[in-house]
Image (tube, rainbow, N blue to C red):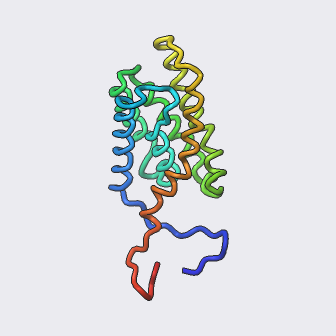
Amino acid sequence: MIMRPGQQQLLLPANPVFIALSLVLALLVNMAGNMGLWGRAAWVPDLLAVLLVFWSVHQPQRVGIGIAFVFGLCMDVHQSSLLGQHALSYAVLSFLAIAMHRRLLWFSMPSQAMQVLPLFAVAHFIEFLLRMLGSGTFPGWSFMLAPVIEALLWPVMSVLLLAPQRMAPDPDKTRPL
């Protein structure tokens, strides 16, 4: 396929099994991270939130507010936090991602990261507000690092998750694409 500079490659359709497996894997990584090395440190990025935004932007017909809500309930149960805290934040995050998905895809990867930073900040602010209302415990100022780290993870996750869609469906020597 001959492409002029600046054009984007056409992508294959996303495999629904790959989408589901990536979301479940992100949930498991979040759960393992909460139990493991860092515990529930406020600065640790939420990989599930990053993947929910990614798939809500790239596949809004498959990953939407309902799926985000269910994964949020799973995180609430796992962390034994206020039931609905993550669910509300993930649902709002997914709604905002779907609302801006057409506009976001026109930007370059660094610009996209800057555009999703406010989304992650809003989600963490919702969790912070609900935590303060529910228990009154302040997580410390390090919670402001998590949205920045998540925005920095955006280009990495985009490259990794779009790689299967960039592969040739049936490559051979005369038809590399």
Residue placed at 45% from the left, 56% from the top?
161
The N terminus sits in image quarter: bottom right
Q: Residue furthest bottom?
A: 174
Rendered location of residue 81, percent (x, y): 39, 21
Q: Is residue 109 left or right of residue 161?
A: right
Rendered location of residue 69, percent (x, y): 41, 35
- Displayed quadrant of residue 48: top left
- Displayed quadrant of residue 107: bottom right
Q: How many numbered discs?
A: 0
Residue placed at 39% from the left, 41% from the top?
67
Rendered location of residue 71, percent (x, y): 38, 37
| Above/below status of 25 relative to 177 | above
Near-viewer residue (111 or 12): 111
Residue placed at 52% from the left, 15% from the top?
132
Rendered location of residue 27, percent (x, y): 37, 39
Q: Residue furthest front?
A: 37
Residue placed at 53% from the left, 50% from the top?
57
Q: Is residue 96 left or right of residue 174?
A: right
